[in-house]
Image: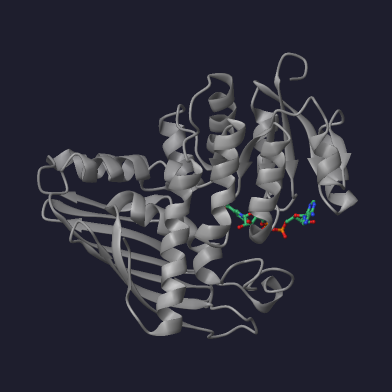
């Protein structure tokens, strides 16, 4: 604690800058420290937040007693190592997606959480996109009827300059377009449609000089009986859509990223579709203008871990929940490599 507030720290200042901004916006915490190998990145934080200490050595930062929560924003293949070190040092953590590269590599985070009795939240901020809650409610309440089909497609573009350093490597990224860009949508798919029964996939390297894939296509069978298709790519110039589409006997709901694009329910009255598209059709920003209580993006997840610590409750997304997407992704890669359908327990 510092000045009666929770002490917040961030390691890794790429997307970590969004955690820095969110912590600075939250009046219940103080940004006590940042850690990165590159001093200039930390200097930019200190320009705006002069009290914040900087560290190039993560273990040194963990010795700072003012720190209560650490956001883990280093490359994906370092998540378990950094998360476990922080938990063992007595800190709560908020770890970036994907929790780790494989289920086996992620489990030590869950084990350390249980051992240390600290809070461990994992980032999947797209669950808090404004249009996702009504979509989930329509499914869970039965309004969508028997959900038989989902189509999910992350058709993005990354040029060759993106694939330098750890991106597109098996040992640090754990894959390509699927685990890096599409893990959010894999998570939304399993959150909306439930437990997976089997996965059958193809993958290719289409347009980049990388060791992992830049295109996957999968058929996902769910235990409920529903079937979904899932496409991921970083070759769809110039970046076309993030399709999240579910179809049931009670109607059809479609979104593109954080914008609702279709709300067609059999039991809806005539104004409902228009109202829903007006409220959620232009993404988080417009939805928040209409309802100022809506908080999305990284802010929602940083606010959540702070409240989980303050009020001693579980964070929104715990390690075992975040691992579900990684299990599906690992199965996609195994299916594509072996040519076999992968069955879940
Ligand atoms: N939630 C999201 O929407 C989102 C978006 C982008 C990235 N991410 C995730 O965040 C993580 C980081 O991705 P990124 O795009 O910010 O990567 P990045 O390469 O831009 O940034 C990583 C930072 O970590 C620092 N770093 C590396 N090793 C370190 C060490 N030993 N000690 C201290 N700092 C170290 C690097 O110097 C760099 O500044 C990845 O797991 C990625 O999947 C999430």
Q: Is residue 194 above or below residue 175?
A: above
Q: Position of residue 9 (x, y in %)?
A: 74, 36
Question: Does residue 257 appear anywhere in the picture?
Answer: no
In this rendered view, identify the residue nearer to me: 166 or 133: 166
Q: Position of residue 220 (x, y in %)?
A: 30, 68
User: In the visual, does 84 lie left or right of 304?
Assistant: right
Q: Position of residue 92 (x, y in %)?
A: 64, 33
Residue lying at the far front of the rendered structure = 115
Residue depicted at x 80% and y 40%? 34
User: In the visual, does 300 lie left or right of 258?
Assistant: right
Rendered-image quarter of ligand 1: bottom right
Q: Quadrant of residue 162?
A: bottom right
Question: Can you say which quadrant of the picture contains the C terminus?
Answer: bottom left
Residue depicted at x 86% and y 28%? 51
User: In the visual, does 279 lie left or right of 82?
Assistant: left
In this rendered view, identify the residue nearer to me: 141 or 103: 103
Q: Quadrant of residue 262?
A: bottom left
């Amino acid at each position: 604690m510092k000045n009666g507030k929770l002490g917040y720290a961030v390691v890794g200042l790429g997307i970590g800058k969004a955690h820095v901004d969110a912590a600075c916006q939250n009046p219940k915490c103080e940004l006590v420290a940042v850690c990165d190998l590159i001093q200039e990145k930390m200097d930019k934080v200190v320009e705006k937040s002069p009290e914040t200490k900087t560290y190039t050595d993560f273990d040194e930062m963990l010795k700072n007693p003012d720190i209560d929560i650490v956001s883990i924003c280093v490359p994906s293949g370092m998540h378990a190592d950094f998360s476990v070190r922080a938990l063992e040092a007595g800190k709560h953590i908020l770890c970036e997606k994907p929790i780790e590269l494989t289920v086996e590599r992620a489990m030590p985070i869950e084990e350390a959480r249980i051992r240390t009795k600290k809070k461990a939240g994992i980032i999947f901020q797209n669950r808090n996109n404004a249009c996702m809650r009504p979509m989930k409610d329509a499914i869970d309440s039965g309004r969508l009827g028997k959900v038989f089909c989902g189509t999910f497609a992350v058709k993005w573009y990354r040029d060759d300059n993106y694939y330098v350093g750890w991106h597109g490597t098996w040992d640090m990224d754990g894959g390509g377009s699927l685990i890096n860009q599409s893990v959010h949508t894999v998570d939304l798919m399993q959150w909306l449609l439930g437990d997976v029964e089997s996965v059958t996939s193809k993958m290719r390297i289409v347009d980049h000089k990388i060791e992992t894939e830049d295109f996957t296509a999968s058929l996902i069978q769910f235990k409920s009986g529903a079937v979904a298709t899932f496409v991921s790519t970083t070759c769809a110039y110039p970046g076309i859509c993030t399709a999240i589409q579910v179809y049931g006997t009670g109607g059809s709901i479609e979104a593109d990223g954080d914008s609702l694009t279709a709300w067609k329910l059999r039991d809806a009255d005539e104004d409902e579709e228009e109202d829903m598209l007006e409220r959620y059709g232009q993404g988080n920003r417009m939805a928040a203008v209409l309802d100022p209580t809506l908080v999305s993006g990284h802010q929602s997840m940083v606010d959540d871990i702070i409240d989980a610590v303050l009020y001693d409750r579980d964070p929104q997304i715990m390690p075992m929940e975040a691992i579900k997407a990684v299990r599906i992704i690992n199965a996609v890669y195994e299916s594509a490599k072996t040519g076999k359908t992968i069955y879940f327990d």
